[in-house]
Image (cartoon, rainbow, N blue to C red):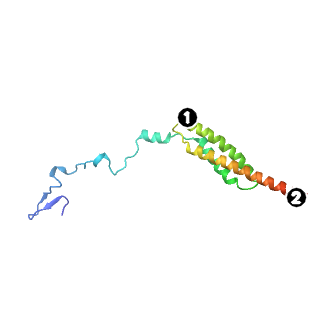
Amino acid sequence: MGEGFDVADSGNPSPSPAHPPGDQGAVPPEPFGGYSDVATPPQPEEQEALYLRRRNSAGVAAALCGVVALALSWIPFVDYTSLVLGTLAIAFGILGIRRANADPGAGKAMATIGLVCGIAGFAIAAIVLLLIYALVTTINATTA
């Protein structure tokens, strides 16, 4: 049997009340609130706005240097590199936070992560170097 039609005993289809005769091919009304399940593609001005999003490259550099400094700070004799990377992370972190405060569109999170990791990496590397220095001087003093 056809959709929207009731077949009477005579074999002639008659329109059902759910589908009036003039309603064939009409666009269904939009759901409540005007939202539909079909996603509309972004308009050209929206696409352009997506590509023009500002980035905080100093914050990204701070995060990268800070995380690497923190990872290398635990390794003896490699933590000299961590001192340099920690210093760079602190400088880039401060620069990135200043840039993010001046331009609200630029992210501040990466700069903050870089600053914190840079400070922690620098401090841990300095402590490890001081402990190694103290250990070496103690060994040299007892053997002489």
Of the numbered discs 1 and 2, the one sitting upstream in the chain is: 1
Q: Secondary structure at mark 1?
A: helix
Q: Which residue is mark 2?
A: 142
Instruction: Pinpoint residue 108: horizontal percent, then vertical percent.
Output: 56, 42
Residue positioned 15% across, 52% down in the render: 21
Please tell me which residue lies in front, 138 or 36: 138
Please tell me which residue lies in front, 123 or 65: 123
Q: Is residue 57 left or right of residue 143?
A: left
Q: Relative to 42, is 134 above or below?
A: below
Q: Relative to 9, is 43 above or below?
A: above
Quarter of the figure with residue 15: bottom left
Residue positioned 66% across, 40% down in the render: 91
Query: What's the distance in space between the residues labelled 1 and 2, CA to CA?
Result: 57 Å
The kind of residue tagged 1 is: Ala
Residue positioned 77% across, 54% down in the render: 131
Q: Secondary structure at mark 2?
A: helix
Please tell me which residue lies in front, 94 or 143: 143
Instruction: Pinpoint residue 124: horizontal percent, then vertical percent.
Output: 70, 51
Q: Which residue is mark 1?
A: 102
Q: Is residue 85 left or right of residue 101?
A: right
